[in-house]
Image (cartoon, coloured by chain):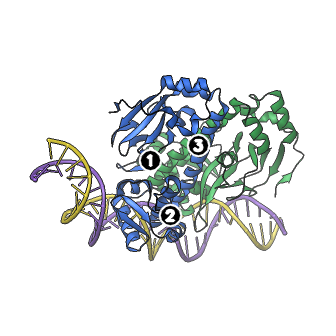
Chain colours: A blue, B green, C purple, D yellow
Amino acid sequence: MPRKSKLKSRKLEELTSIWKILTKEEKEILRQNYDVKEFKKGDIIYQEGEKPTYLMCVVEGQVKIFRNGFGGREQIVRIITPVSYFGYRAHLAKEDYVTSAVVQCRTVIFFIPLKSFDIILNQNIKFSQTFLKFLAADLGIADFRVANLVQKHVRGRLAESILFLKDNYGCEADGATLVVSMTREDLSGLSNMTTANGIRTLSQFVSEGIVEVNKRKIKILDEEKLLNISHFG
Amino acid sequence: MPRKSKLKSRKLEELTSIWKILTKEEKEILRQNYDVKEFKKGDIIYQEGEKPTYLMCVVEGQVKIFRNGFGGREQIVRIITPVSYFGYRAHLAKEDYVTSAVVQCRTVIFFIPLKSFDIILNQNIKFSQTFLKFLAADLGIADFRVANLVQKHVRGRLAESILFLKDNYGCEADGATLVVSMTREDLSGLSNMTTANGIRTLSQFVSEGIVEVNKRKIKILDEEKLLNISHFG
DNA sequence: TTGTTTTTGTGTTTGAAAACACTAATTTTA
DNA sequence: TAAAATTAGTGTTTTCAAACACAAAAACAA
């Protein structure tokens, strides 16, 4: 259950990519309607089939967007890290959610009612274009991933996922350790394979000196090789 | 090679979904800059890695958007049928194309320079929102398809694809025969399987009385069963 | 801190689909 | 209209990864 917290200390200014393009009046609309909530690991933000009601923004933590498959297997569609928006796609397409969202660890999320979102969308062309760009980028990733997930073998898919996590969410100060950290199960879900195969294959990569693993932190040692595996199975 | 034709008889008014939301001046911009070309089967519109330069609209025929995989296998990402736009995603994400586009049969396409597109995008909020909706819808389909293609077995994937073709491109007057017609190879590419398995599985469906096949036209006889297969492998 | 649950790790078996290898039938084009 | 090139169709073999089945370790709660 989302626990409403006294997190109003977290200001809307944190929504960097959109805050600066809003007019005074628009900022005021958000100020009067926004909400901040804190979630703990495993909390569900929304589920497949529900109607979207908020534009959400992760300012701290990590959210997993996924679809439930058959036999309990889940396919991870996107990972949302700070500062990124989610929940708006279904609304813009005038659909119910086709995915579910759960938080991966302690996570702070801003909630903006879609009514406010629509008001601004209808008057601020830069705002509208910002989301145009978000969607276009995500669709590119999805198109790319469909073909990859579907055609490559386990090694290629895992290599691909690790590089994807690096490219999209970045590394820590050492330039090699991934910022996102996830369980083997989630990494497997992202790579479209069973947990057992994910663990096995990651272990292979470790023994081949391609990556180093410390708990749930993955450090890329040989990106060249990883790229190679991702490319040629 | 695209052959420029005397197709100026085809008027921009055919671009139904956007034409009605443009101002007089914007219509004039398009009139002065657009182009119409006719292509024949197999002509390439653009290829992976190229820079986008036009917003395109199919007004007649069919275009296949795909990614080249390994060992010559291609993954079909989208099919564009009249009247739909394509080529703008990469531009909006400020990327090069990650897919390629070829025409499937005799096809007539409108070309609008991205410069003109940008001008209108920057001043007409309804125009911008139209594309917002297109992208949001396509991203939903992509998210949905990733999980489907990846988790289901051949029968489920083929059933899914046939239903997808029906839902997205419609049926002929009888309400059962798919409008889109494609080779077994393309149907297999859409369903992420080898041509041999696509043919085999389609034949199975025919012998089970689920669909009827006449050349490249597919008629759905038992949608219930198809849904069932698509859902439970 | 102890018990419980989740996550990680590994071996074996089994099944499904890819790869391969052809033939037949259609389309296309020269 | 004949020849060439696709496309459709089918059987066999091989390979890969899922399913199953555990054991061990780590994380989490009571």
Between disc 3 and disc 2, whose residue precedes?
Answer: 3
Q: Nearer the viewer, mark 1 or mark 3?
A: 3
Mark pair 3, 2: CA separation: 27 Å
Q: Nearer the viewer, residue B140 or B178?
A: B140
Judged left or right of residue D16, residue B14 is right
- Given residues B120 and B20, the one toward you in this image is B120
Labels 1, 2: one chain? no
In three-dimensional space, the C-alpha distance between marks 1 and 2, rounded to whole angstroms, equals 25 Å
Residue A152: assigned label: 2
Residue type (three-letter) at the residue carrying disc 3:
Phe
Element under label 3?
A: helix
Which picture quadrant has residue A177? bottom left
Q: Which residue was labeled with disc 3? A: A134
Q: Residues within 10 Å of mark 1 (few under 14, many from 20)?
A: some
Query: Which residue occupies 55% across, 57% down?
Result: A147
Residue type marked 1:
Ile
Q: Considering the image in quadrants, where does the N terminus of chain B appear?
A: bottom right
Name the chain letter of the residue that bears numbered label 2. A
Identify the mark at residue B229; answer none if there is no mark.
1
